Amino acid sequence: MTKLAHSDILETIHMVDDQHLDVRTITMGITLLDCVGDDINTVCRRVYDKITTKAANLVKCGEDIELEYGIPIVNKRISVTPISLLANPFSADDCVKLAITLDKAATATGVNFLGGFSALVHKGYTKGDRELIAAIPEALAQTERVCSSVNIGTTKAGMNMDAVREMGLIIKQLAEKTADRDGFGCAKLVVFCNAPEDNPFMAGAFHGVGEPETVINVGVSGPGVVKYALEKMKGADFGAVSETIKKTAFKVTRMGQLVAQEASRRLNTQFGIVDLSLAHTPAVGDSVATILEEMGLECCGTHGTTAALALLNDAVKKGGVMATSYVGGLSGAFIPVSEDAGMIAAAEKGVLTLDKLEAMTCVCSVGLDMIVVPGDTTAATISAIIADEAAIGMINQKTTAVRLIPAPGKKVGDMVKFGGLLGSGPVQPVHQESSEEFVARGGRIPAPIHSLRN
């Protein structure tokens, strides 16, 4: 294990105490491929037993590391094999039973979220995919800790527009089923292009088929630390700003590497990756938006925001990759509106709009995330937003995603409160012009020419 100098330890304590530094999540990935079967009750029993056995000590391990090292570990989570791979023999109702089983397993292990109620349909559907996707509204409405994701496109395969159209409908159904909580179920569902197999962050985490039996993936945090470092760089040029962010990201990632290695050793589980993403909280001072404003922007979302975000994202990656040999997940700077105090403020002012957020996603991780839109937004409009964001990922060979909440009964200017890390978000306007005919075409948008690299 790497030895830390006394000054490094003191600096880390300062970061934790005053700058909101933490490990955002330890996520254990667990394969469920050996739980397959033709009887839903048997499969549910196998799934529950596998998860509760493999992750029995996950939460305690995280808590012990927190106490011994003084490093806050905010979340302990589980990701599992995409459930659609187990679902071919079953109906949508059976898939809901599986989701409820996953929720019970998450509760038994004490984790706050479990991801993997997922399907990968970028090139087409299997029967299991169709049944799982049909089950999503009921499954997420009936569970508290289960998260879902659907991958509808890749750079290699193109974009499945039939799935894009369907996901607009699914999101609307889920919002209605959780209308008593302002559509909260939609906060547990993300639609991906180029979904990674080793992402530790929710709602998009799942345990890919190329992953080992079990694995530990860690996601770091640290926007407050970066902002603090930049406060000392008033008037410095962008080269100096980049160097400062790189050095800070290195320190943050080293902490994540330490926690990941220690958790892997104690749980006798393979160490997977460290996700370098600057995960924020709704707390003041722990915001990606305020980092961008520290570079000289009056408000996040004004002209120059995309350039500032590009610099931040690049510098975080350059610093982080020097601190760990295994980088994965999403790795960049997140910009979810409801989970970031600075983003919330900018959106309330009307400076940070949906169109500007889409432009920003071209240069960062991961996409249009935790954005509340009016409850009367049509399914076709939601599908078209998904298609736009997926196109950015497909063309630019990066992961993009959409997590929209069409809050029932809410209109532009209202505030929706989710609580905890999910924060609160102002309802933002969408374009009123119809995309119905565009979405209705269906089929598959072909992969871009630069995907032909073999």
Image: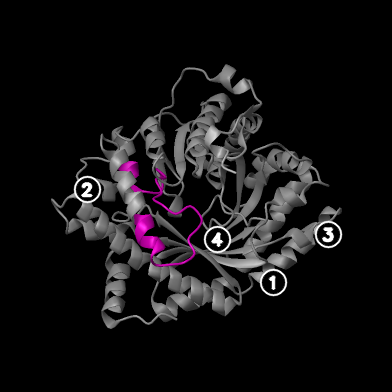
Disc 2 packing (10 Å; few <14; some 14–19; many ≥20) = many
Q: Which is nearer the N-term, disc 3 or disc 1?
A: 3
- Type of amino acid under label 1: Thr
Q: What is the span of residues highlighted in magenta in the rendered image? A: 316-345
Q: Which residue is mark 4?
A: 112
Q: Secondary structure at mark 4?
A: loop
Q: In the drawing, what numbered circle is on residue 53?
A: 1
How far across and down, in percent of the image, does residue 326 sit? 49, 64
Q: Quadrant of the N terminus?
A: bottom left
- Type of amino acid under label 2: Met
Q: Which residue is mark 3?
A: 42
- Between disc 1 and disc 2, the foreground one is 2
Q: Which residue sits at x=56%, y=44%?
A: 194
Disc 1 packing (10 Å; few <14; some 14–19; many ≥20) = few
- The image quarter containing residue 167 is top right
Q: Quadrant of the C terminus?
A: top right
Residue 21 visible in the shown view: no
Q: Which residue sits at x=53%, y=20%?
A: 435
Q: Which is nearer the N-term, disc 3 or disc 2?
A: 3
Disc 3 packing (10 Å; few <14; some 14–19; many ≥20) = few
Which secondary structure class fits the magenta region best? loop
How far across and down, in percent of the image, does residue 179 sit? 56, 37
Q: Which is nearer the N-term, disc 3 or disc 4?
A: 3
Nearer to the camera, 343 or 390: 390
Q: Which residue is mark 2?
A: 295
- Type of amino acid under label 3: Thr
- Between disc 2 and disc 4, the foreground one is 2
Label 3 and label 1: CA atoms lie apart by 16 Å
